[in-house]
Amino acid sequence: MCSPAPAHAPRPSKTDALKNLIVNRFHLNFKEQIGATSAAIREAHPHSRREWEEYYYRHIRTRPQLRALGQDMYRKIRTDLIPALLAISEVECCQYLHELVIHKTFAGYVAEVEMVRQLLQRLLSGVKIEPAPDEWDRGLAVDFYLRAGQSLIGLQIKPISVEHLPQLHLWERIWKTGHEEFTRRYGGRVFTAYHLTRGTLKELHNPEIVEEITAEIHRLIGQHRGGKGRPIPMGPH
């Protein structure tokens, strides 16, 4: 049976994180269960926790209703969660962590890079951005390429965080040899598109790269038309 609520805010418990997961799992914090608390507290504009408590129990839910919800949570733990948790084997735990760390992380990274490629594809209208062969990725630090006359332009896409920004020049120094080799073979420069994640959105850290790539395309096409260029290998296709 649920004991009366304490008069003061309870101290953090070691099980708070677990209880939070359970509440989210069974949607016990949905407004259908506990009411629209965010809107209600703004409307009430309480000056103390006691004022909010009185307003909530008077206008949103009653004490017996919230107590019944807590009892329902306890029943779900006993009848649903504990049997399910005890049924998980050691092998399943090892397999799950492998899936999480290896497969899901890699799949998320690939999806992230593809999202940025599609963004650049839209910004560079009329230009087809194609995936580079594996040997370019390893040897030349090039993820994608695009054609400009008889030349190729390389494109590298790198996710970064705010903490990585001061280190960009170190990365670029490491990639420099591969990028110079790409230019020697295929005529065009290699551009690195850095992108940051803000919430669920991906945005270019260096949007000026679009104008730089466009200028390089025009340079290479003009070079070819002027007869200054030479036929070079056209990449993997």
Image: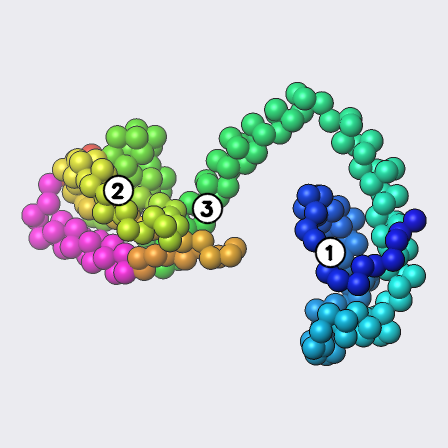
**Residue 216 sits inside the magenta stretch:** yes
Confirm or deny contact between disc 2 and disc 3 (CB under 8 A).
Answer: no
Tell me the amino acid under the disc marked 3.
Glu
Number of residues whose C-alpha sits closer than 10 Å to that of mark 1, classed few (under 14), some (14–19) or many (20 or more): few
Residue 77, image x, y percentages: 82, 41
Write the residue at 31% across / 34% down.
137
Q: SS of the residue at dot 3?
A: helix
Task: For marks 3 and 1, give the one nearer the viewer.
Answer: 1
Q: Which residue is mark 3?
A: 112
Write the residue at 66% across / 20% down.
91
Q: SS of the residue at dot 1?
A: loop
Q: Which residue is mark 2?
A: 171
Image height check: is 79 above or below 86? below
Q: Which residue is mark 1?
A: 10
Q: Residue furthest top?
A: 91
Write the residue at 88% across / 43% down.
75
Residue 124, image x, y percentages: 33, 57
The foreground one among 105 and 154 is 105
Residue 47, image x, y percentages: 69, 77
Write the residue at 79% across / 63% down.
7
Tell me the amino acid under the disc marked 2.
Trp
**Which contiguous range is marked in magenta?**
208-230
Tell me the amino acid under the disc marked 1.
Pro
